[in-house]
Amino acid sequence: MNRDIHIPQSEIDAALYTCEQIRKSFTGERFCFVESYGCQMNDHDAERLTGMLAMMGYTLTDDKSKADFIIFNTCAVREHAEKRVMGNLGALKKLKDEKPELKIGVCGCMMQQKEVSDRVYKRFPFVDMVFGTNELHLFPQMFEKILCGERVKQVRDIAGEIPEGLPAVRKIPFSTNVIVMYGCNNFCTYCIVPYVRGRERAREPQDILRECRELAQAGYREITLIGQNVNSYRADDGSDFSDILAMVNDIDGLERIRFMTSHPKDLSDRLIDAMANLDKVCNHIHLPVQSGSNRILSLMNRKYTREHYLELVHKLRDKVPGVEITTDIIVGFPTETEEDFRDTVSLVEEVGYAAAYTFMYSRRPGTKAAVMDGQVSEDEKKRRLHELNDVCARLLREQNKKYIGTVGEVLTEGVDERQTVMAYGKLPGFKMVYFEGDHELIGQKVKVKIKDAQNNSLIGERIE
Ligand code: SAH
Ligand code: SF4
Ligand code: F3S
């Protein structure tokens, strides 16, 4: 893994200084609307953008018509994600016509593909700024320019640097994400991520630890350590991901540690032991399998077999009490036959996932799979997706029933006022539990007894 190369402190200082200058340059309230698509890495970038905007004096709003600045942080992982952004962007023209002083930005993974950012810049002349995944710390300077009426497009090749020290506005006050590594080296043949996020870079253990400590001191109870493949983490000093888990586990005030995503090829016995032995580490692992067919796994360049994956599942179940496993699955990868698809269905039945995120294969220009022969038709992909989803839903219902009568601890995340007022939160594993409770419980741990099971969640009752 690449050494951690920090962006020079002088550049971070310049970013923060520019934020202050912008704040001083206007009076009155200003609002920003920040929308993020895609994964947790992207969400976190959006939190950093919001952090810089807050330093500039902007307040976050969820009402586009009230905003003085609107930014879309895009995702390129599937065509569907790209289409959504294009549609939402088109709809902003009317807002800009009504309010010419409105500023609009587009950034993120989709923009990191230069031909796409060029296209967006040309097609949407009302967009003021376009930048990629590698320019987050340059945002204040670019923003200063657009406030002066310039249009800005900046997409650099990925330099593989790590930004430390940018502010963040975090969405939830008791649970948040901390990045342990950037980028991906795996080049699964369907996937655009390595192209738009660059090679793997590990943050230094002390930087990760410092951020986690500060968050715990600020009252955060739950931290999710994130990266494209957190278990591939390897620092300069030789620390691996289980060492990071052990360090974070020692932080006073933190109660739960989660992590995602894990790649099956790098799931070590050490990590499984860490999950079993560290009291704050939740008994949940997101372990994308993608396919149950060895032929397809090999074409995908996933570097493990069905048998190896199932062996990992058995080890996890043996060693980590009550472990819940979630996954990602792609149907309709080029040349996938009915028989390959059956292998996926049988694997899903064998594992019994707590959740499976299922996708139809989407052709990503520039990836190896995009030019493979044997592309599967949309209709066939849809049929396989529906069948797989039905199987997953049935298995989930059966699995959820097993929880009835058990007692567990829920970290309350929020309150749903749609029907009767119900609080909700997760068990240490992955299951969401709804129970009678109010806003006061948010961020608190509550003991519940499970009374009933629904398709995607459990119903519980508070016990003391
Ligand atoms: N790094 C993570 C996942 C990143 S992308 C991992 O390796 O597991 C999240 C998920 O999107 C992937 O797990 C995969 O299931 C899905 N995905 C990625 N590229 C895709 C494509 N071209 N078409 C359909 N689904 C895709
Ligand atoms: Fe994409 Fe594969 Fe890397 Fe995950 S491991 S981000 S699926 S290339
Ligand atoms: Fe999408 Fe980029 Fe994440 S492509 S899934 S937002 S790394």
Image: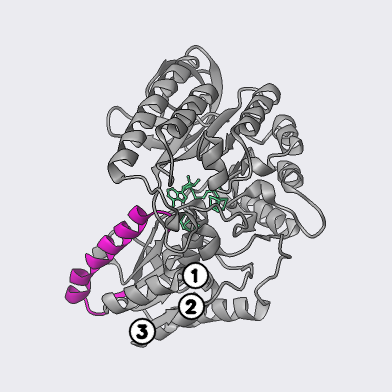
Q: Element type at marker 1?
A: helix
Q: Quadrant of the N terminus?
A: bottom right
The mark found on residue 52 in the picture is 1
Q: Is residue 282 left or right of residue 365?
A: right
The relative height of residue 283 versus residue 57 in the rendered view (above or below) is above
Q: Residue furthest top?
A: 405
Q: Is residue 111 left or right of residue 242?
A: left
Q: Determine which residue is flagged by label 2.
A: 140
Question: Residue 84, percent across and down?
Answer: 30, 57
From the image, give the main secondary structure of the stretch colored magenta: helix
* Helix, strand or loop status at disc 3: loop
Name above or below for residue 283 compared with residue 300: above
Q: Quadrant of residue 10?
A: bottom right
Q: Where on the picture, by quarter, is residue 202?
A: bottom right
Q: CA distance from mark 3 to mark 1?
A: 20 Å
Q: Residues within 10 Å of mark 2 (few under 14, many from 20)?
A: many
Say whether residue 436 is visible: no
